[in-house]
Image: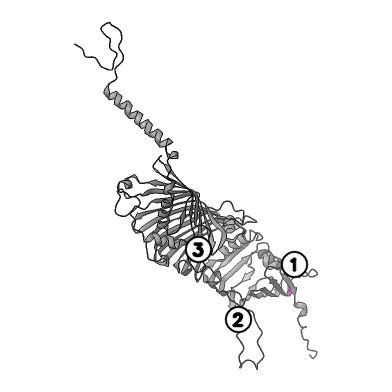
């Protein structure tokens, strides 16, 4: 006899159809679905009707105790989806009164997600704390302290388990703290600077009980200019625990990339410095906050002036090594090389120096030198700086020497040193293939005048020569049988040049074309009633910094040659 499925329709004895019968298994499924739908409905509808505001003070106090700062909330809401947690509205963390009265952190909305397993251990833990568009004030006092220092040290004394630890333990697990669309403002003492970081995404977590990991990505901005594209600033690394901030172990890497030079100068200087191109700056710091080793690399691509486009823009790849001390206020033993050490390219420049206090740039001293920079490279840089250099001008020779920068309080030129171009050559093909420069070109610093003593007062005082650089007599082939001579002096006020000897009009004009800044105003003193030459010249040029150059014909003021009447 064939069995029948109880879920199928059955007929009674009269042959009429009976009501369908549902199996217990199917009924159980339907009940599960109904309960699930009811639970989902409750999760959606109930939270607005569940008041957790009575826990508002407890939550604020708990967060404040963990930060070491008073915390205020306007409202607390319960969320059950997608994960149980709380939404905190108008979240404010008070500032340390020593750094001002404006809150250190302010956020309209903060979401804290609960760790469900922590509830079984009768302890509330949060897996994630998310800030939406918070405003954070970073305050640096004139004493060298930061307002976040006390928060960091307070957190360092609180025992915490790693963020990704699966099971609850004796110590609460550190939450994953994140922020999106944040704004970081920089204040010096009680004054807010125009520099800030906008559209910042921030994350902080604890991968190890003794170490935090942080990540930051933002766009630098400046409120007193109309900067737009400022590149991207990124910072990532680890911070360790310590009893004081200066002993906190750090391993940080920062990068400011894809920075247009014009917009970058607006951020740093508050104005467009007149340069174009792109910059990428990277830096690594490893050690402690008080003493760490630094590695930095600066790359400039297609760098040029804003007012014209040279045939070959400048590209720079500069690497620097050094030590940061005094909580990153001082930088010592800085050594930079272009190209970086170990490169297959020949060395171009080397820079070394110190910055005793970053808050006082006049405390910096540095030295820049070259083992042998080609004069053709110098001419290329000259063309990047000035659009007036003809393309057919060529140069040869090698530049060696060094310059030292040490600011002076008496207004003297802060540069000292010696530069030498050996076997110098400068050719303007419009005046033939012969070089305009003959031999070497030497520039040396002149010492400041020695103070008078009782041994020198009775003597005739020596002429006071301002501290600066002296251009040694340089031979110029200007069309005469013997070379002409150019010498001069450079100081903090400007420079003065003296050109004397035999010259022709064509060679003088070729020199003025090859070095346009030298030729400014020269045509005004060139003779118009003479043949092409050569003829004797004695010219003096002066140019105060920031003003025009003036050439003077001093040959008319020379004493007339003495003729003996007795033969």
- Image point 68% across, 74% down: which residue? 496
Task: Name the residue nearer the viewer: 32 or 328.
Answer: 32
Query: Can you identify the residue that label 1 sits on?
Result: 523
Magenta-colored segment: predominant secondary structure? loop
Choose mark 1 or mark 2, whichever is in front: 2
Please state the extent of the stretch shown in magenta in the rendering. Answer: 522-536
337 sits left or right of 440 in the view: left
Residue 174 or 180: which is nearer the viewer?
A: 174
Q: Dot 2, how many residues are within 10 Å of its Cα: few (below 14), some (14-19), or many (20+)? A: few
**For discs 3 and 1, the disc positioned in front in the rendered view:** 3
Within the magenta stretch, is there residue 347? no
- Decide which of tag 3 and tag 1 comes sooner along the chain: 3
Asked which colour scheme the image uses, the reply is: one colour
Q: Label 3, label 1: how many angstroms apart (C-alpha)?
A: 68 Å
Q: Nearer the viewer, mark 2 or mark 3?
A: 3
For the C terminus, which image quadrant?
bottom right
Q: How far apart are marks 2 and 3 (CA)?
A: 50 Å
First in sequence: mark 2 vs mark 3: 3
The secondary element bearing badge 3 is classed as: helix
Q: Is residue 524 magenta?
A: yes
Per the rendering, the mark at residue 448 is 2
User: Is any atom of residue 240 visible in this view?
Assistant: no
* Snapshot quadrant of residue 532: bottom right
Tag shown at residue 97: 3
For the residues bearing labels 1 and 2, Cβ distance under 8 angstroms: no
Whichever of callouts 1 and 2 sits on the residue coming sooner in the sequence is 2
- Outermost residue, left direction? 1
């Amino acid at each position: 006899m064939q069995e029948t499925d109880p879920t199928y329709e059955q007929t009674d004895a009269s042959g009429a159809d009976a009501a369908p019968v549902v199996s217990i298994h199917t009924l159980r499924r339907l009940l599960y679905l109904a309960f699930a739908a009811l639970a989902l409905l409750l999760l959606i509808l109930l939270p607005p009707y569940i008041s957790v505001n009575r826990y508002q003070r407890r939550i604020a106090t708990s967060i404040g105790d963990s930060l070491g700062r008073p915390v205020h909330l306007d409202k607390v809401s319960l969320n059950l989806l997608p994960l149980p947690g709380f939404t905190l509205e108008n979240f404010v963390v008070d500032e340390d009164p020593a750094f001002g009265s404006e809150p250190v952190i302010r956020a309209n909305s903060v979401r804290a997600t609960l760790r469900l397993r922590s509830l079984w251990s009768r302890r509330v833990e949060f897996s994630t704390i998310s800030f939406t568009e918070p405003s954070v004030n970073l305050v640096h006092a004139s004493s060298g302290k930061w307002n976040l220092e006390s928060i960091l040290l307070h957190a360092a004394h609180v025992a915490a388990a790693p963020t990704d630890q699966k099971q609850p333990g004796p110590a609460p697990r550190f939450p994953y703290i994140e922020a999106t669309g944040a704004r970081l403002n920089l204040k010096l003492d009680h004054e807010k600077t125009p520099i800030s970081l906008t559209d910042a995404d921030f994350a902080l977590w604890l991968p190890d009980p003794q170490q935090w990991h942080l990540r930051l990505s933002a766009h630098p901005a400046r409120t007193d200019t109309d900067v737009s594209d400022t590149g991207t600033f990124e910072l990532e690394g680890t911070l360790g625990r310590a009893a004081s901030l200066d002993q906190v172990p750090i391993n940080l890497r920062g990068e400011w990339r894809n920075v247009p030079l014009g917009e970058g100068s607006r951020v740093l200087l508050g104005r467009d410095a007149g340069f174009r191109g792109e910059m990428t700056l990277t830096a690594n710091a490893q050690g402690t906050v008080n003493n760490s080793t630094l590695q930095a690399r600066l790359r400039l691509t297609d760098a040029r002036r804003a007012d014209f486009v040279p045939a070959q823009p400048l590209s720079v790849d500069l690497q620097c090594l050094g030590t940061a001390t005094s909580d990153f206020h001082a930088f010592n033993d800085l050594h930079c090389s272009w190209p970086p050490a170990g490169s297959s390219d020949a060395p171009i420049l080397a820079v070394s120096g110190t910055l005793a206090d970053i808050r006082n740039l006049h405390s910096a001293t540095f030295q820049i030198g070259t083992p042998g920079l080609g004069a053709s490279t110098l001419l290329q840089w000259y063309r990047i700086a000035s659009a007036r250099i003809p393309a057919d001008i060529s140069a040869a020779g090698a530049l060696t020497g060094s310059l030292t920068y040490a600011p002076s309080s008496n207004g003297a030129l802060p540069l000292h040193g010696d530069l030498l171009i050996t076997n110098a050559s400068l050719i303007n093909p419009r005046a033939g293939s012969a070089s305009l420069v003959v031999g070497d070109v030497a520039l040396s610093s002149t010492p400041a005048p020695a103070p008078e003593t009782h041994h020198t007062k009775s003597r005739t005082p020596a002429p006071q020569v301002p501290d600066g650089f002296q251009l040694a007599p340089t031979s110029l082939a200007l069309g005469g049988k013997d070379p002409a001579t150019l010498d001069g002096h450079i100081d903090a006020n400007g420079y003065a040049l003296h050109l004397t000897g035999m010259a022709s009009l064509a060679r003088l004009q070729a020199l003025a074309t090859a070095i346009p800044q030298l030729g400014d105003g020269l045509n005004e003193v060139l003779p118009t009633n003479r043949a092409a030459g050569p003829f004797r010249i004695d010219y003096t040029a002066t140019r105060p910094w920031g003003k025009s150059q003036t050439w003077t014909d001093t040959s008319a003021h020379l004493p007339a040659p003495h003729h003996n009447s007795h033969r």
